[in-house]
């Protein structure tokens, strides 16, 4: 079949008018970012999600496109977040035996660690003179993005700001975690994984998993359970403090 | 991949973030390192105690 060059322009216009274009832009940005990430041997600062957000945001700003227009297409990806959140229960299920055998320690550390994490965000937020909306967006930052955004919305934060903050938290945990734990001379692999999983969710967990199997499993357990505990304590703490 | 659409939404708050970026980054950095360290140390202490 012959293609008339002028027809190509029509296809472009058609695509641009349709949500499919924004979907393609999002997936294309992700593929580029992931390629770069793989090429640099999974360098934490080049996290593909963060990079994709930068690429897409940059495109929208340069071409002066409204976010609502972009979202009309990208929402098809956004809607998948719901089922994906449910899938987070899988690591808890898979590691149920470990959780049960160490249940007291795990439960104690999960609760204390999550409370501390939420309070430290609140305390530092006040210390740096941030307003309550920003603090609300910061408080759930240590859990995985879909849960964090849900909590943020519930307490009057800005979900998209929380998404960015959460990803940055993950990147910091993944890149500085090993260093921090070496300084503190934590040698127990389970403990190291647990700290990384609780403080820096999936991005930290992926890093721990690639370094050490035990650390990875405990990171996954900590990440899953802290997601549940944090979603319960953040609204409570927030309403007590504000 | 799923977080990209909502993450891009941050461009709506750029103006607002301009004044706060440094403070927010500081909270994330200090908070993450502290909670990661404390959790790991606590876990190690408690498991050691169990072994005795």
Image: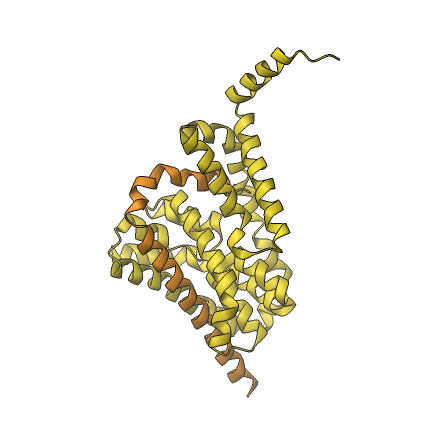
Chain colours: A yellow, B orange
Observer-nearest of A67 and B40: A67
Give how far across and how far down residue A14 sits, in percent. Answer: 55, 17
Residue with the most extreme front position: A5
**The N terminus of chain A lies in quadrant:** top right
Looking at the image, residue A117 sits to the left or right of residue A33; the answer is: left
Looking at the image, residue B47 sits to the left or right of residue A232; the answer is: right
* Number of residue marks: 0
Q: Residue at x 53, y 42 (%)?
A: B2
Q: Residue at x 57, y 54 (%)?
A: A89
Q: Is residue B40 visible from the viewing direction of this image? A: yes
Give how far across and how far down residue A11 sits, in percent. Answer: 59, 17
Observer-nearest of A210 and A83: A210
Residue with the most extreme right position: A1
The picture quadrant where one finds residue A123 is bottom left
Give how far across and how far down residue A205 sits, in percent. Answer: 56, 60
Residue with the most extreme bottom position: B52
Give how far across and how far down residue A117 sits, in percent. Answer: 39, 63
Q: Is residue A49 above or below residue A201?
A: above
Q: Is residue A226 visible from the viewing direction of this image? A: no
**The C terminus of chain A lies in quadrant:** bottom left
Looking at the image, residue B24 sits to the left or right of residue A63; the answer is: left
Q: Residue at x 58, y 64 (%)?
A: A208
Q: Residue at x 58, y 73 (%)?
A: A189
């Amino acid at each position: 079949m012959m293609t008339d060059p002028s027809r190509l322009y029509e296809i472009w216009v058609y695509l641009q008018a349709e949500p499919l274009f924004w979907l393609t832009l999002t997936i294309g940005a992700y593929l580029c970012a992931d390629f770069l990430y793989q090429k640099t041997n999974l360098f934490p600062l080049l996290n593909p999600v963060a990079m994709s957000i930068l690429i897409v945001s940059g495109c929208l700003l340069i071409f002066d496109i409204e976010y609502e227009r972009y979202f009309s297409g990208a929402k098809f990806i956004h809607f998948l977040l719901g089922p994906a959140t449910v899938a987070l229960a899988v690591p808890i299920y898979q590691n149920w035996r470990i959780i049960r055998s160490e249940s007291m320690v795990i439960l104690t550390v999960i609760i204390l660690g999550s409370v501390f994490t939420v309070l430290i965000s609140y305390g530092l937020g006040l210390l740096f003179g941030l307003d309550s909306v920003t603090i609300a967006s910061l408080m759930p930052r240590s859990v995985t993005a879909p849960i964090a955004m849900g909590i943020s919305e519930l307490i009057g934060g800005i979900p998209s700001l929380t998404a960015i903050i959460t990803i940055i938290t993950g990147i910091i945990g993944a890149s500085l975690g090993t260093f921090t734990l070496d300084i503190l001379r934590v040698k127990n692999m389970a403990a190291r994984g647990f700290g990384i999983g609780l403080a820096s969710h999936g991005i930290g967990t992926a890093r721990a998993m690639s370094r050490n199997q035990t650390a990875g499993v405990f990171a996954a357990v900590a990440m899953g359970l802290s997601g549940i505990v944090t979603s319960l304590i953040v609204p409570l703490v927030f309403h007590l403090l504000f | 991949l799923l977080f990209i659409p909502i993450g891009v939404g941050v461009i709506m708050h750029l103006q607002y973030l301009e004044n706060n970026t440094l403070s927010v980054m500081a909270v994330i950095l200090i908070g993450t390192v502290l909670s990661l360290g404390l959790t790991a140390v606590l876990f190690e202490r408690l498991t050691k105690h169990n072994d005795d």
